[in-house]
Amino acid sequence: MSVTVFIRYQLDPFKRAQFEEYSKRWLTIIPKCGGDLIGYFMPHEGTNNIAFALITFESLAAYEAYRARLRQDAEGMANFHFAEENKFILGEERTFLRKVVL
């Protein structure tokens, strides 16, 4: 059974451009490390400090293997450090979802 990780980010609304740069970097890093990236989604209208990401994996075990690869990836670690140094992410929540099928 596949799982989709739904990530909800709370952003500093004055640093959205930095979050978008951070998101664009993940577009190549995540697939390289084994995630099926559905996408990152930025605020457009309405709430200006919430963004989302959706990544699918074959299983929770595949997700755990991906996380281990991500921690060994130089680009991935550089992107984590970019976020920490610039403090544009104020909060992050992860929810693991499964698709409803007949």
Image (cartoon, helix red, strand yellow):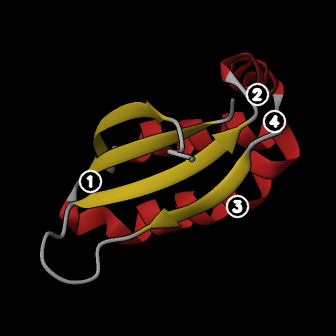
Which label sits on residue 74? Answer: 4
Residue type (three-letter) at the residue carrying disc 3: Leu
Q: Position of residue 27 (x, y in %)?
A: 70, 61
Mark 3 or mark 1: which comes first in sequence? 1
Residue farthest to the bottom?
45
CA gap between label 2 and label 3 equals 15 Å
Residue type (three-letter) at the residue carrying disc 2: Tyr
Q: Which residue is mark 1?
A: 11
Front residue of 8/28: it is: 8
Question: In the picture shown, does residue 23 fall above or below 9?
Answer: below
Q: Position of residue 82 (x, y in %)?
A: 54, 45
Q: Residue at x 33, y 33 (%)?
A: 93
Q: What is the crowding at mark 1: few (fewer than 14 residues within 10 Å), some, or many (at least 20)?
A: many
Question: In the picture shown, does residue 20 fall above or below 50?
Answer: below
Q: Residue at x 33, y 47 (%)?
A: 9
Front residue of 85/8: it is: 8
CA gap between label 4 and label 1 equals 24 Å
Q: Check if mark 3's residue and mark 1's residue have beta carbons within 8 Å.
A: no
Choose mark 1 or mark 2, whichever is in front. Answer: 2
Question: In the picture shown, does residue 91 fall above or below 17?
Answer: above
Q: Residue at x 81, y 35 (%)?
A: 74
Which label sits on residue 66? Answer: 2
Q: Is residue 100 left or right of residue 55?
A: left
